[in-house]
Amino acid sequence: MKTTNESPHLAALLLFATGILAGFFALATAVKAQETGSERLFQQRCGSCHSLQIGQNGIGPHLAGVIGRAAGSIEGTRYSDAMRDSGIVWDNRSLDTFLAAPHEVVPGTRMTVTVPDDTQRAAIIDYLENQ
Ligand code: HEC
């Protein structure tokens, strides 16, 4: 008779454990989705011209370690004079204003792409910062 008394407890315990596991999986998936979201955003909006590999310069310079870097400083990139002479050192703030309106921050820049959406800019800058 003892076994029939125990099995409901066991079932409840199993259900409880499954619930906890499911919770962890849901959390892990959400975090993953967020990461790939900003990565995809970067690839879609910037990836055709910018790489994150040092030395890989395409239409634009590579953006590995761009935060803290002097604007127009990557050898082998065809910068505009405007960018070379801008005197900017890239940080979150200057990147944010540049991506919102490149021509207002660096008049004469060759980069014409803008990211008007605040949230998308923040996600891209965050992604660049964590590379
Ligand atoms: C169509 C090509 C193109 C796309 C897309 C593009 N850029 Fe650029 N980017 C350039 C070019 C060209 C330059 C050099 C501009 C200059 O010299 O005036 C540049 C310069 C930059 C710089 C300055 C780098 C330095 O070394 O001073 C940053 C930062 C930058 N881009 C970020 C981005 C980000 C972030 C995105 C995506 C939202 C993006 N760019 C999308 C072409 C592009």
Image (tube, helix red, strand yellow):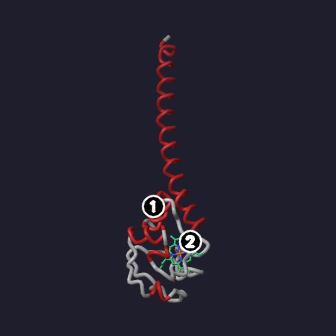
Query: Viewed as shown, does residue 37 lie left or right of 130?
Result: right
Real-space Cα distance between discs 1 and 2?
16 Å
Residue 39 position (above or below residue 82): above
Judging from the image, what secondary structure is the residue with disc 2 in? loop
Please, is residue 26 above or below residue 120 in the view? above
State yes or no: Cβ of the residue under disc 2 lies below 8 Å from any atom of ligand 1.
yes
| Residue shown at the point (55%, 81%) measured from the top left | 110
Q: Give percent across and percent down for residue 97.
A: 43, 69
Residue at image x 48%, y 63%? Answer: 121
Q: Nearer the viewer, residue 49 or 64?
A: 49
Q: Residue at x 59, y 80 (%)?
A: 58
Q: Is residue 48 left or right of residue 97?
A: right
Name the residue furthest top.
1
Report the residue at 48% width, 50% height from top. Answer: 31
Percent of width and height locating residue 41? 56, 62
Q: Kindly identify which residue carries mark 1.
A: 122
Task: Identify the image quadrant of residue 66.
Answer: bottom left
Q: Report helix, strand or loop for mark 1.
A: helix
Q: Which comes sooner in the sequence, label 1 or label 2?
A: 2
The kind of residue tagged 1 is Ala
Query: Disc 1, disc 2: CB below 8 Å?
Result: no
Q: Which x, y percent locates residue 108?
A: 51, 83
Q: Which residue is mark 2?
A: 113
Tell me if residue 98 comes above or below residue 80 in the rendering: above
Q: Nearer the viewer, residue 59 or 104?
A: 104
Q: Position of residue 84 (x, y in %)?
A: 45, 87
Q: What amino acid type is highlighted by mark number 2?
A: Val
In the picture shown, does residue 33 fall above or below 26? below
